[in-house]
Image (spheres, rainbow, N blue to C red):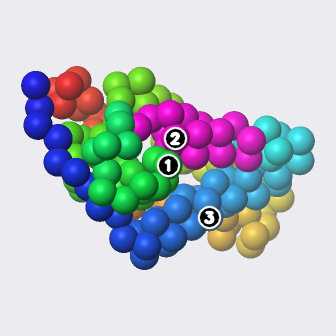
């Protein structure tokens, strides 16, 4: 059994990390809204639910493993934007299995929609959304590459 360390989250990490995740979701929502406005509402609801409820709140192993009580919101920035080991993030296996799906939902789906929109309309707004989505995806993908590709070796 792995000995888990207690983790303390700073207010800066909580605020800016969760703000960056919310901005990523809003960028994807804007990209989905380029083609189908009702699809943007579905994307916002699904991605918000999966990230903040399933990965955040329900993904916690135990509140006793955190020095600061964050209702699971402290580990989200660590999950998406840092190179912490999985053992130090206090995440259950169900949430680890859900992470690749959430990453594809937040990255690949909006990027594909923005690319199709650029081809259809050739607009600067669509292109800037595509660039922003690719930047977020590359940043989190490079930081979480080992987790997304070699998930089974960490279990």
Q: Check the image and name the residue furthest to the bottom.
A: 12
Q: What mark, if any, has residue 71 been given in the picture? A: 1
Query: Tag 1's secondary structure?
Result: loop
Sequence-wise, which precedes: disc 2 or disc 1? 2
In the visual, does 48 lie left or right of 74?
Answer: right
Q: CA distance from mark 1 to mark 3?
A: 20 Å
Q: Which residues are magenta?
A: 44-60
The residue under label 2 is 57
Determine the image quadrant of residue 26: bottom right
Sequence-wise, which precedes: disc 1 or disc 3? 3
Discs 2, 1 touching: Cβ within 8 Å? yes
Residue drawn 79% across the image and 38% down it: 42
* Residue 41 in view (yes/no): yes
Residue 92's spot in the image, x, y percent?
Answer: 35, 29
* Residue 118 in view (yes/no): no
Mark 1 or mark 3, whichever is nearer to me: 1
Foreground of the two, 121 or 125: 125
């Amino acid at each position: 059994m792995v000995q888990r360390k207690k983790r303390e989250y700073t207010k800066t990490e909580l605020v800016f990390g969760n703000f960056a995740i919310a901005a990523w979701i809003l960028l994807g929502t804007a990209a989905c809204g380029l083609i189908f406005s009702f699809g943007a509402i579905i994307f916002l609801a699904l991605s918000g639910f999966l990230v903040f409820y399933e990965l955040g709140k329900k993904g916690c192993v135990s509140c006793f493993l955190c020095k600061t009580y964050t209702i699971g919101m402290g580990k989200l920035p660590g999950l998406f934007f840092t190179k912490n080991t999985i053992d130090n993030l206090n995440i259950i296996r169900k949430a680890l299995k859900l992470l690749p799906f959430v990453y594809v939902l937040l990255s690949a789906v909006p990027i594909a929609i923005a690319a199709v929109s650029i081809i259809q309309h050739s607009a600067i707004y669509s292109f800037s959304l595509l660039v922003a989505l690719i930047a977020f995806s590359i940043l989190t993908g490079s930081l979480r590459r080992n987790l997304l590709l070699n998930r089974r070796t960490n279990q």
